C-alpha cells in the first residue's frame, strides 16, 4: 500500500508580475515611494508620540487613534520596503514563507482597521448618547480589552486563512500583483479551494458587517446630535473624521477584494496596480492627517512639540 501524498506545495519562490509592464517608469515610482513612505511614517509616529507624551491625551478616544496609527505603520511595513527593493531589482520574486508573512501582515492590518474603527464608534456612542455613564463603562480595563480585540480577532482570522493556504498544493508560481494576496495564491492551487473560499467570505462578511454596524450607529448619533449646538459641534469634531476613515478603508478594501476575484485582465496594469494599492496608500496617510489636523487638542500638542521655542513655551 502506497503512503498518502503529502499536501505540501513544491513552490519555494513566487514571481510578482505586477511591475512587468511598467518597469520603464520605475524611477518615477521609486522617487514617489521614497518620499511618500517616510512622510507616512513621520505623520503616524508624530501622532503616536504626541498622544503618548501628553497626559491630556490619555483618554479612550485618543488611545484608539494611537492604535489606528500604530496599525498603519504595521500594515505598510509589510509592503513598502519590499516594493522599493523590487523597483531596484531585475527579478521580482518573494519566498513562499515571505509571501505568507506579507499576506498576514497586510491583511491583518486591514482587518485591524475595521476593528479599531468599530470600538471608536462604540466610544463615540457612549460619549455622546450616554455621557453620564461614559467613565464608568469606558474604564482603563475596558480600553485594554478593546485594544486586545482590535488585534487578536484579525490575527486569529488571518492565522486560519494562512493555514488554509499553506495546505494547498500549487501548480503555479506567478502572482499577478505587486504583493502577495490571499486569492492570488489560492488561484494557483491544483485542486479545489472551496474551504478557503467559504472561510474567506465569512471573514469578509464579518468585517464588512462591522462597517454596516458603524454606519447604523452613526445614524443614531446624528439624530442625537442635531438636537443641540454642542452635540453638533462634538459630532463634527470627533465623528466626521471617523466616518471619513471608515468610508475610505471600506471602499478601498472592498474594491481590492472584489477586483482580485472578479476583475478583468483587460484593464491596463498601471490602473490595476493603483486599485490594488489604494488601501495601502490612502488610509495610512489620511488617518494621522485628518485626526492630527482636525482634532484641536492633538493639533495644539503637535505644534507645541515641534515649535516649543518659537511659541515661547517653557
Image (cartoon, grey):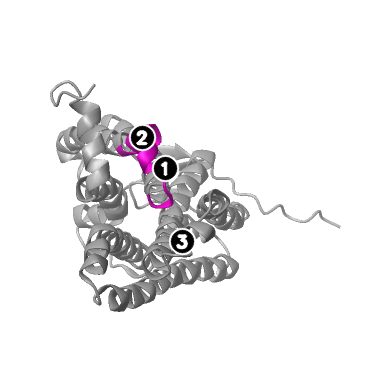
Rendering coords of residue 53 (x, y %):
37, 32
Badge 1 element: loop
Q: Which residue is mark 1?
A: 58
Magenta-colored span = 47-61
Q: Nearer the viewer, mark 3 or mark 1?
A: 3
Q: Quadrant of residue 31?
A: top left
Asked if residue 65 is among those painted magenta in the image, a careful observer would answer no
Badge 3 element: helix
Q: Residue at x 77, y 56 (%)?
A: 4
Total labels drawn: 3
Q: Which residue is mark 3?
A: 134
Q: Which numbered marker is on residue 114?
A: none
Q: Is residue 92 visible?
A: no
- State the separation of the CA atoms marked 1 and 2: 7 Å
Badge 1 local density, few (<14 within 10 Å), some, or many (20+)? few
Rendering coords of residue 231 (x, y %):
27, 68
Q: Which numbered marker is on residue 54?
A: 2
Instruction: Determine whether, in the image, residue 80 is placed left or right of residue 183.
Output: left
Rendering coords of residue 10 (x, y %):
59, 45
Instruction: Determine whether, in the image, residue 143 is placed left or right of residue 167.
Output: left
Badge 2 element: loop
In this rendering, the answer to whether 225 lies above or below 290 is below
**Residue contact between numbered discs 3 and 1, judged by CB atoms under 8 Å:** no
- State the separation of the CA atoms marked 3 and 1: 15 Å
Query: Which comes sooner in the sequence, label 3 or label 1?
Result: 1
Instruction: Determine whether, in the image, residue 122 is placed left or right of residue 22.
Output: right
Amino acid at each position: 500500500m502506497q503512503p498518502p501524498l503529502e499536501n505540501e506545495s513544491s513552490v519555494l519562490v513566487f514571481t510578482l508580475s505586477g511591475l512587468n509592464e511598467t518597469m520603464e517608469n520605475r524611477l518615477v515610482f521609486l522617487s514617489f515611494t521614497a518620499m511618500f513612505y517616510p512622510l507616512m511614517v513621520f505623520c503616524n509616529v508624530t501622532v503616536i508620540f504626541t498622544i503618548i507624551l501628553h497626559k491630556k491625551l490619555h483618554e479612550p478616544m485618543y488611545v484608539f487613534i494611537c492604535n489606528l496609527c500604530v496599525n498603519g505603520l504595521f500594515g505598510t511595513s509589510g509592503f513598502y520596503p519590499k516594493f522599493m527593493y523590487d523597483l531596484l531589482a531585475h527579478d521580482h520574486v518573494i519566498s513562499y514563507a515571505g509571501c505568507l508573512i506579507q499576506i498576514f501582515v497586510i491583511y491583518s492590518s486591514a482587518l485591524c482597521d475595521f476593528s479599531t474603527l468599530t470600538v471608536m464608534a462604540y466610544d463615540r456612542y457612549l460619549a455622546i448618547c450616554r455621557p453620564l455613564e461614559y467613565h464608568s463603562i469606558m474604564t482603563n480595563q475596558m480600553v485594554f480589552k478593546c485594544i486586545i480585540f482590535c488585534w487578536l480577532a484579525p490575527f486569529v482570522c488571518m492565522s486560519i486563512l494562512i493555514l488554509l493556504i499553506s495546505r494547498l498544493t500549487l501548480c503555479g508560481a506567478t502572482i499577478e500583483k505587486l504583493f502577495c494576496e490571499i486569492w492570488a495564491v489560492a488561484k494557483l492551487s491544483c485542486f479545489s479551494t472551496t474551504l478557503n473560499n467559504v472561510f474567506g467570505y465569512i471573514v469578509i462578511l464579518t468585517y464588512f458587517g462591522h462597517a454596516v454596524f458603524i454606519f447604523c450607529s452613526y445614524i443614531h448619533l446624528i439624530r442625537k446630535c442635531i438636537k443641540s449646538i454642542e452635540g453638533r459641534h462634538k459630532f463634527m469634531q470627533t465623528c466626521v473624521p471617523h466616518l471619513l476613515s471608515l468610508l475610505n478603508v471600506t471602499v478601498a478594501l472592498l474594491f481590492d477584494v472584489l477586483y482580485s476575484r472578479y476583475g478583468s485582465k483587460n484593464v491596463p496594469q498601471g490602473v490595476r496596480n493603483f486599485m490594488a494599492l489604494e488601501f495601502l496608500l490612502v488610509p495610512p496617510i489620511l488617518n494621522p492627517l485628518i485626526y492630527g489636523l482636525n482634532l484641536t487638542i492633538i493639533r495644539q500638542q503637535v505644534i507645541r512639540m515641534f515649535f516649543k521655542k518659537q511659541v515661547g513655551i517653557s
